[in-house]
Amino acid sequence: MRLTVFLAVLFILGLSSCATSLSRKTTKFEKIHHGFTGIALLDAETGKNIYQYNAHKSFTPASNTKILSLYSAIKCLEDSIITFRYRKAKDSLIFSATGDPGLLDSEVSSSTSLQFLRNSKDSIYYQKANWKQKMYGAGWSWDDFEYAFSPQISAIPVYGNTAIFTMENKDLKVSPEIFSNYTRTINSETLEKLKGTNEFRIPQKLQKNDTLRIPFETSEELSIRIIEEEIGRTIKIIPPGPKASHNIKSVASDSIYKQMMHTSDNLIAEQLLIMISEKMTDTMSTKISIDHAKNSIFKGLPDEFQWADGSGLSRYNMNTPANLAIILKVLLDEKGKAWVSTIFPTAGKHGTLANLLTDEEAFVFAKSGSLKNNYSLSGYLKTNSDRLLTFSIMNSNHMSSAKEIKAEVSKLLIHIRNNY
């Protein structure tokens, strides 16, 4: 009995010592970088709080917001992505879009949906969406609108809503090809798009195999024109109408989720919320999906939070380390370790975490989030004692470079691995 009590006391003292040491490192980190840091650690098996530091304070989560979009999609969407809904009327095929971000995207596309349209013997009609969404998310930076990571949100995305320019030998390849007649080379160092148009100016010094990407101005009419060229069929556009009961599916939803989390694909994150609202109602609206998720899926979280978009590009988003650590725990419970370790990138190996903890044997799979003066990392960590933790480390208002912040976060992760 005395031995048991003695060992229990030693264990508690050990945890206290670990927490004190981590707290010292965290406060030093804050002081050096003149920022604000929050940490939440949970035991992934029991859900017990292991360590908290400003865990219930609000931070700008950036792309950690995609964790919310991911879990919302898992709860609301099917195991396979629905690209089109359709119905038949006499000799007519009438189809509508769901907001699927994978159509004609080289990374995640499937030919199934377009092949279905191509093979139809009926006249084809596209039924426009009941669209109640702006092309850019609330709180997005105007400075980012011409960068490839900030494409427009749309009812029927194609090519990731991004124009792609590649120099193959001495020939410029343009995708979608429809933009070829609106593309010129100029004496410039950067790719440019004339404001409010789909006219592009390409640098003359583009080298062989170089690829440049820039978002284009979207519309349902443009997407349908691009699809017409792809399938060699005429498609007539008709006003919004009733939702059809038949579906055309493309890829497994997990392949879309993995692409979003590994590459931090902002369009996928935004379109998942569009797809949720389209499935739940007859309307495409980010707000509908967010309101539903906040009032049902995330109702039990300990802290209030602000949620403005799917991707985390918005600076209106605010969340806490405690909330994110709990969501990650629930996600692990529902999907299992093998699933989360596949969908989330592994530090030192995959996607946006390929350059993090490169000198260490893999022990972290997580989602990063970066906006200027903000860096967060939330996910799963395996300790040296073979213990699995869910964690969220959030940093806001720091004055250091992203490289410096990531280096300090890496030190915290290694400390946690070695001491818990």
Image (spheres, rainbow, N blue to C red):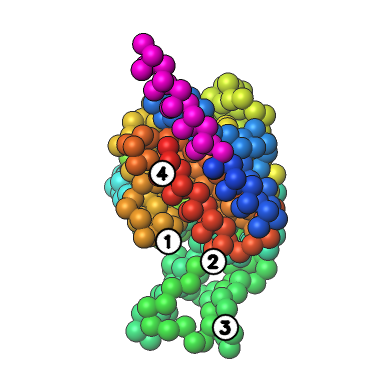
The residue that label 3 is drawn on is 189
Placement of the C terminus among the 4 image quadrants: top left
**Labels 3 and 2: the sequence-earlier one:** 3
The kind of residue on which mark 1 rests is: Asn
The kind of residue on which mark 2 rests is: Ile
Number of numbered discs visible in the structure rendering: 4
Specify whether residue 12 is painted magenta: yes
**Depth check, front residue: 11 or 64:** 11
Alpha carbon distance from label 3 to label 2: 14 Å
Q: What predominant SS class does the magenta segment belong to?
A: helix
Residues marked 4 and 3 touching at CB (< 8 Å): no
The residue that label 1 is drawn on is 355
Given this view, does label 1 or label 3 mark the residue nearer the observer? Answer: 1
Residue 80 falls in image quadrant: top left
Given this view, does label 3 or label 2 mark the residue nearer the observer? Answer: 3
**Labels 1 and 4: the sequence-earlier one:** 1
Given this view, does label 1 or label 2 mark the residue nearer the observer? Answer: 1
Alpha carbon distance from label 1 to label 3: 28 Å
Name the mark on residue 214. Answer: 2
**Labels 1 and 3: the sequence-earlier one:** 3
Against 52, residue 187 (above or below) is: below
The kind of residue on which mark 4 rests is: Arg
Q: Residue at x 58, y 88 (%)?
A: 187
**Labels 2 and 4: the sequence-earlier one:** 2
Q: Give how far across and how far down residue 298 sits, in percent.
A: 56, 26
Secondary structure type for disc 3: loop
Q: Give how far across and how far down residue 214 sits, in percent.
A: 54, 66
**Labels 4 and 3: the sequence-earlier one:** 3
Placement of the N terminus among the 4 image quadrants: top left
